[in-house]
């Protein structure tokens, strides 16, 4: 029941217990909701999906890995792997609400940390995402990657695909992004993500940190991977002392 496909079941058996536990916490509500946690056939995002994703982030301040106003009172940090099926579920089911209700309104800033632990394609995608982030379009890029259903380590996340995704975002210089994907700035960004994960004992994705901006955050473990679960936690933080 946890894993709708044989491929997911094999992944679960090969996964360390800490990550399996995190996957379990996320997969149970997905299974009961009737959603499929693992992507099947490889698909490119439709034209409608591309347009919706680009519009989702329009006119919201974005700098590097941060989406939203720098002085927003709350900060939610999201740790992902761009091949992770549960991260994809978060991006599709929860992220649009968080972007609209909190980042656009200035109530919270969202920070994306890429752990890239599922294989070489995760690293390639993370590096391209980081390079697009140097042009302040990281969140559009990651949302578009997740919108393209890709089997893990299938060879789908190659340079050509990543370049096409970057090219879907207005104002992104694809050649510059490709050149900077191996840069020291991107390496630093990914190293910082790993250090931050180690600091909080994070070994799985998606994992979340929530806190008031400028203060030490705490790991957020929502009971369900739904917008309501995150809204409850963020609203409680904003209303607290």
Image: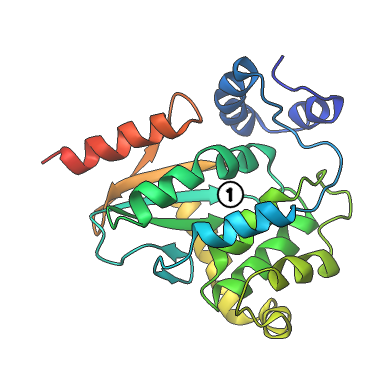
Please, which residue is most extreme toward the front here?
48
Residue at horizontal 35 percent and vertical 36 percent from the top? 231
Quarter of the figure with residue 47: bottom right
Question: How was this image coloured?
Answer: rainbow
**Residue 8 horizontal side relative to residue 86, left or right:** right
**Residue 113 horizontal side relative to residue 209, left or right:** right
- Above or below, 58 against 227 in this view is below
Q: Find residue 32 and report its horizontal and vertical position in percent.
A: 61, 15
- Above or below, 131 against 148 in this view is below
Residue receiving disc 1: 80
- Above or below, 137 against 31 in this view is below
Q: Is residue 198 visible?
A: no
Quarter of the figure with residue 138: bottom right
Residue at horizontal 81 percent and vertical 45 percent from the top? 152
Image quarter in which the N terminus is found: top right
Quarter of the figure with residue 168: bottom right
Where disc 1 sits, the SS reads strand
Q: Find residue 183 and report its horizontal and vertical position in percent.
A: 65, 81
Please, which residue is most extreme toward the left here?
241
- Above or below, 94 against 213 in this view is above
Q: Find residue 229 and report its horizontal and vertical position in percent.
A: 40, 29
Residue at horizontal 73 percent and vertical 84 percent from the top? 175
């Amino acid at each position: 029941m946890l894993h709708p496909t044989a491929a997911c079941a094999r992944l679960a058996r090969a996964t360390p217990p800490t990550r399996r536990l995190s996957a379990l916490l996320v997969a149970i509500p997905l299974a009961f909701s009737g959603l499929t946690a693992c992507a099947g056939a490889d698909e490119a995002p439709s034209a409608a999906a591309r347009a919706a994703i680009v519009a989702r982030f329009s006119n919201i301040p974005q700098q590097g890995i941060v989406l939203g106003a720098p002085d927003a009172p709350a900060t939610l940090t999201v740790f992902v792997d761009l091949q992770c099926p549960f991260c994809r579920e978060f991006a599709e089911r929860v992220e649009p609400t968080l972007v609209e209700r909190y980042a656009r309104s200035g109530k919270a800033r969202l920070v994306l940390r890429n752990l890239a632990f599922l294989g070489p394609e995760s690293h390639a995608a993370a590096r391209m995402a980081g390079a697009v982030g140097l042009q302040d379009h990281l969140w559009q890029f990651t949302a578009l990657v997740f919108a393209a259903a890709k089997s893990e380590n299938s060879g789908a996340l190659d340079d050509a695909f990543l370049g096409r995704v970057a090219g879907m975002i207005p104002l992104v210089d694809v050649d510059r992004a490709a050149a900077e994907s191996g840069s020291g700035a991107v390496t630093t960004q990914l190293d910082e993500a790993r250090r931050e994960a180690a600091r909080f004992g994070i070994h799985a994705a998606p994992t979340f940190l929530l806190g008031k901006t400028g203060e030490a955050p705490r790991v957020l473990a929502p009971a369900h991977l739904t917008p309501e679960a995150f809204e409850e936690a963020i609203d409680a933080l904003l209303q607290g002392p």
